Amino acid sequence: MTHTLPFSQVDVFTTGPVLGNPLAVVHDADGLTDEEMAAFARWTNLSETTFLLSPANPGADYRVRIFTTSGELPFAGHPTLGSAHAWLESGGVPAAAHGRADVVQECGAGLVTVRRSPAPGGGARLAFAAPPLVRTGVPSSAELERACAALRIAPGDVVDATWLVNGPEWLGLRLRDAAAVLAVEPDLAALAGVSVGVVGPWGDSPGAPGDADVEVRAFADDREDPVTGSLNAGLGQWLAGTVLPPSYVASQGTALQRRGRVHVELDADGQVWVGGATTTTVRGTLAL
């Protein structure tokens, strides 16, 4: 049986096309099997592909399934924002009970709230409520040494380190500054099976972009990810309001000639929000 379904590709965490992290979104996907979803995600060869379905939870506006080229994730950041953008753009209307026109997304990690707020220059910025970290803690000496060896840095270059697990299992490393982050030249093959995120402040460093407070890089699945919502969510829960201001902007993708900007905010209730601009770059239909 051939399925003909609406399809869109969304660029996430950037104000201009082809400068953020792309996401493939398949709409009205209730009729697809697990195998068809996995096969299409492998074919797109993007970091993630999502499928929009009818919600199973009455508190949700829609349900999303998130696939990488190798399996399914319970939660991921840029697929959350890109999926919400695609759902709204296709005519989705949030339930009035959610308040403030918030969108409630159902995924493998449960319900995730996505809020809309005015963006400078017009339009709206989407931000998701960072889900609770299911595991934190200082990595073992062996774990830290392996990560540092793969990044080709010395353990002494790491100011602080912790696990940040919110679906994806990130090992977060804080380096002395943004220049140290951009200088990392990883051995990606040596990182197989480990997801590592590095962050460093820009401060008054020469070459600071002016619209970002920190530089972030993410390495997972033998590749560098352009702009990463789940990692930035974990970093915000770790650093916002302590090492970093309660509200800050992360630059990511610089090393890949992208221009990702992730807005992180710790609100008065202790909730971390992770947001950015989203734009559709491809619209059409999928025959599968």
Image: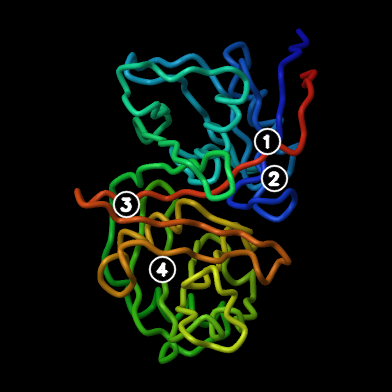
Residue 285 image position (x, y, % from top left): 78, 20
Would you place residue 14 above or below residue 110 in this image? below
Contact, CB < 8 Å: mark 3 with mark 4?
A: no
Mark 3 to mark 2: distance in Å? Answer: 27 Å
Closer to the chain start, of discs 3 and 4, is 4
Choose mark 3 or mark 1, whichever is in front: 3
Mark 3 to mark 4: distance in Å? Answer: 17 Å
Q: Name the residue under label 4.
A: 172
Residue 32 image position (x, y, % from top left): 63, 16
Would you place residue 21 above or below residue 243 in this image? above
Left or right of 141, for residue 120 = right
* Quarter-of-image position of residue 51: top right
Mark 1 to mark 2: distance in Å? Answer: 7 Å
Q: Residue at x 37, y 34 (%)?
A: 112
Residue 231 image position (x, y, % from top left): 45, 58
Q: Mark 2 points at which residue?
A: 46
Contact, CB < 8 Å: mark 1 with mark 2?
A: yes
The amino acid on which the numbered mark 1 sits, given as a three-letter code, is: Ala
The amino acid on which the numbered mark 3 sits, given as a three-letter code, is: Val
